[in-house]
Image (cartoon, grey):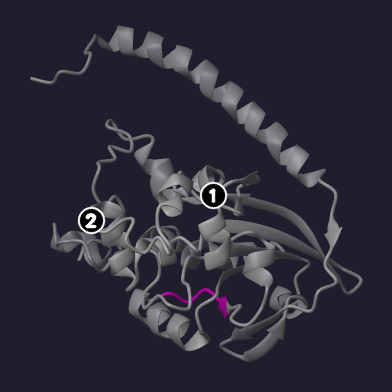
Amino acid sequence: MTKHKTGTREEWLAARLELLKAEKELTRRSDELARRRQELPWVRIDKDYRFDTDEGKASLADLFRGRSQLLMYHFMFGPDYNAGCPNCSAIADGFNGFAIHLANHDVMLWAVSRAPIAKLQTYKRRMDWSFPWASSSGSDFNYDFNASFTEEQQRMGNVNYNYSKGGVSSRQVEIAATETASEVVTEGPRAEIARSVGTDWATYIREMPGMSAFALEDGVVYHTYSAYARGLDGLWGGYQWLDRAPKVRNETGGIWWRRHDEYESQSPSLGWCCR
């Protein structure tokens, strides 16, 4: 017998109609936020960022590939990683499906990481992805857009992430107690996630997730928008479905998302996503 509240169909419908009012209000607020995003002032990019891609060296303007708009997902894959972040990987699983739609609406979608291009290509083949992925290795790009941080910044708590200065997470006190913070997290889910990319927790979170938007007009690139942390929830297809499931996100204290080739097989009919 379920412990959840139960009721008649009439009671359900009455409650559902009340919820619908709130959902419609949220939709209107989301529309308003989208309008306000479009009204943000554009910031001209004069720095000559260079990236490594499957086709060779590229500038930021090159990544537009003939479109006037560019969306870049800051994928957590640092130079010391040997695999991509499992959470970023779960988000990126959806890129293949809608990248072509964006491209036909004048928008190029890229992932960008600091790992060398060879590592990104190897991991991309493992995940069976086809979306474009650029390496910003040797560039200030990730640092300038607050998605990567140096060990010194981390140790001193001089980190500005998600428009808040003071640390990537609530780790400042922990880090202060150690020289490099490499031994701060050695057990538990966080340590397991770090080990899954081949590094320790402190090194792992020198990269953080985010997305940045750019426009190209008359040969000039402008930065138009960036979002981080929970600001990415709306881009994460899995969350949108789970939030509508009976038990919603049902997150646990353990590893929440895994790479799609790391789940135990549950049903042959589910294909690669659960192998």
In what quadrant of the picture does the C terminus appear?
bottom left
What segment carries the magenta color? 129-134
Compared to 92, does 9 lie above or below?
above
Q: Nearer the viewer, residue 188 or 25?
A: 188
- x, y (%) of residue 46? 85, 71
Left or right of 2? Residue 271 is right
Magenta span includes 161: no
Q: Is residue 104 visible?
A: no
Determine which residue is flagged by label 2. Answer: 187
Three-letter code, disc 2: Glu
What distance separates the C-alpha of mark 1 from that of mark 2? 21 Å
Identify the residue position indicated by label 1 in the image: 167
Specify the quadrant that holds the N terminus: top left
Residue 208 position in % (x across, y down): 51, 59
Residue type of the residue flagged with mark 1: Gly
Is 192 situated above or below 199?
Answer: above
Q: Are marks 1 and 2 in contact (CB under 8 Å)?
A: no
Q: How far from the left and from the top, in percent, is residue 52? A: 61, 86
